[in-house]
Amino acid sequence: MNWSDEGIVLSVRPHGETAAVVELFTRMHGRHTGLVHGGRSHKKRPVLQTGNHVDASWKGRLAEHLGHMTLELRTGYAGAAMESADALAGLTSLAALARLLPERDPHPNLYEITLFVLGFLDDPSVWPALLVRWELALLSELGFGLDLEECAATGTNDALIYVSPKSGRAVSASAGEPYRDRLLPLPAFLLKGRRSGTGVSETDVVNGLKLSRYFLEQRVLAPREIGMPEPRIRLETLLQRR
């Protein structure tokens, strides 16, 4: 069987002397791997870079086999990200977290969001906030989305400034005041109808990363008995220092 799709390179590892096993996040076939002949050659290495947007063709005798892939570059996001340590950390963090998705399970909405974020990696005033939103979208795709539309205690949607670490629901300033030390900060740019882009403070971005990290660790990583990917840790450290 065979298929053609587009995808984003998530990882590349050597196989034998000249080949490479490439993992993609594809639009219609989800997270998928394949063997690329000559993948370690000088000609193909620029294409097989984490974060690049590619056209892919996969062929295998059975669907469950590793199969063979041929790839053609669409957009070289990896090369552009290498001009900034922060952007490169954002790209590698996104790729590492995308590997938490179930293999061969399509997530077309998250795929579109991913391309949108990658398209802004050259704008440091925008992409960090977009990446926070991407991480919350990832949580939703994995079945652990947060409810940030109304207060868990009062049902209102005004003055939402906290998130309950137990329920993942928003909490208003008044309802959360007695428990403020046990609640997580909710940056305003994550509220419905708010734009995540220019004007979002670095403190808001860092708080957003802490919020998504908490639920990724508690609801996704801990049950699998794995830790937060190192690129994601490095990203948060870099942005905290800015």
Image: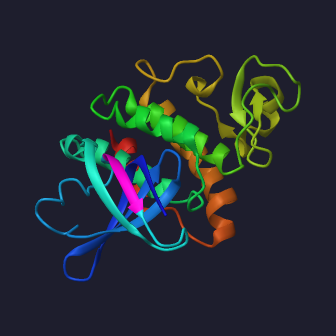
The colouring scheme, among rainbow, by chain, secondary structure or one colour, is: rainbow
| Number of numbered discs on residues | 0
Please give the name of the residue rendered at 56% of the width and 62% of the height, measured from the top-left corner: 103
Q: Residue 151 at what x, y percent from top left?
A: 81, 27
- Residue 232 located left or right of residue 184: left
| Prevailing secondary structure of the magenta residues | strand
Question: What's the magenta region?
Answer: 53-58
Q: Is residue 206 visible?
A: no
Please give the name of the residue rendered at 20% of the width and 45% of the height, measured from the top-left corner: 79
* Quarter of image, res 157: top right
Q: Residue 131 at what x, y percent from top left?
A: 46, 38
Observer-nearest residue: 105 or 199? 105
Q: Can residue 61 be seen in this view?
A: yes
Answer above or below: position of 198 versus 12: above
- Residue 119 located left or right of residue 158: left
Answer above or below: position of 72 versus 176: below
Answer above or below: position of 13 versus 52: below
Q: Residue 192 at what x, y percent from top left?
A: 66, 21
Please give the name of the residue rendered at 56% of the width and 41% of the height, measured from the top-left corner: 108
* Residue 128 falls inside the magenta stretch: no
Please give the name of the residue rendered at 62% of the width and 16% of the height, measured from the top-left corner: 193
* Quarter of image, res 167: top right
Taking the view exactly as shown, the residue that stands out farthest to the left is 42
Indicate the quadrant containing the C terminus: top left, top right, bottom left or bottom right. top left
Q: Residue 113 at what x, y percent from top left?
A: 49, 35
Taking the view exactly as shown, the residue that stands out farthest to the bottom is 16
Answer above or below: position of 232 versus 212: below
* Quarter of image, res 152: top right
Observer-nearest residue: 224 or 208? 224
